[in-house]
Image (tube, grey):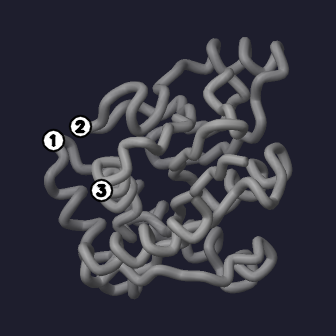
Amino acid sequence: MGKIFYVMGKSSSGKDSIFKEIKKRMPELKDIVLYTTRPIREGETDGLEYHFVGEDTLREMEARGCVIEQRTYHTKCGIWRYFTASDGQVDLETKNYLVIGTLESYEAMKLYFGEEAVVPLYVEVEDGLRLFRALERERQQAEPKYAEMCRRFLADLEDFSEENLEKASIKKRFTNVEFAACVQEIMDYMLQFC
């Protein structure tokens, strides 16, 4: 049976970079691309990081019963929704997948696909370094949204609290201070399940 390797962590923990590096080194892993109604950011590609859709598409998918889970964020830039859909992307009989998402979406995927099918890959970074990385990333945007960056940073402290990690049975953690070492540690861990 295939596995869904689920990368997650607070904003600016490096999870996007880790996800991309693992995909580069293990191209046999398939994607489950999540959906969002938020605007696409500079450097993102529709269908790669997310499927960027409008509210109408979300409502249509809800009506068809395709939405596995959904999160709504009241941001400084408006209401943004993120969701996972059962849209024919997953075949656990023959394939392994690499996904990136939140703790909440990870738990919904476990419920939908079964706990044995979903392997958590929790990436963490000390909060001071994480804040520095977030600020550097935001500075590179054509129109930095510092208030939203701060909201995300603070929300993650709650979303990924020790209590929530414990409830989700997240035991194994990967510290991303030295990128290459962190990626290798995650890949070595993944190979135990393949």
Within 10 Å of disc 2 (Cα), the crowding (few <14, some 14-19, many 20+) is few
Looking at the picture, tell me which residue is in the foreground, 1 or 160.
Answer: 1
In the rendered view, tell whether residue 71 sits above or below residue 187. Answer: above
In the rendered view, tell whether residue 164 sits above or below residue 140. Answer: below
The amino acid type, in three-letter code, at marker 2 is: Glu
Q: Which mark is residue 21?
A: 3
Q: Which mark is residue 42?
A: 2
Image quarter of the C terminus: bottom right
Residue receiving disc 1: 142
Q: Residue at x 67, y 85 (%)?
A: 162
Looking at the picture, tell me which residue is in the foreground, 132 or 20.
Answer: 20
Q: Secondary structure at mark 2?
A: loop
Whichever of labels 3 and 1 marks the residue nearer the N terminus, that label is 3
Looking at the picture, tell me which residue is in the foreground, 8 or 5.
Answer: 5
Looking at the picture, tell me which residue is in the foreground, 56 or 125.
Answer: 125
Q: Residue at x 59, y 46 (%)?
A: 74
Q: Looking at the image, can residue 51 be seen?
A: yes
In the rendered view, tell whether residue 87 sits above or below residue 128. Answer: above
- Where's residue 177, x and y in %? 29, 83
- Disc 3 and disc 1: Cα gap in Å? 25 Å
Within 10 Å of disc 3 (Cα), the crowding (few <14, some 14-19, many 20+) is some
Q: Do tag 2 and tag 3 residues touch (Cβ < 8 Å)? A: no
Q: Nearer the viewer, mark 2 or mark 1?
A: 2
Q: Do tag 2 and tag 1 residues touch (Cβ < 8 Å)? A: yes
Q: As drawn, is 65 to the left or to the right of 133? A: right
The amino acid type, in three-letter code, at marker 1 is: Ala
Q: As drawn, is 104 to the left or to the right of 112? A: left
- Disc 2 and disc 1: Cα gap in Å? 8 Å
- Disc 2 and disc 3: Cα gap in Å? 19 Å
Whichever of labels 2 and 1 marks the residue nearer the N terminus, that label is 2
Q: As drawn, is 102 to the left or to the right of 41? A: right
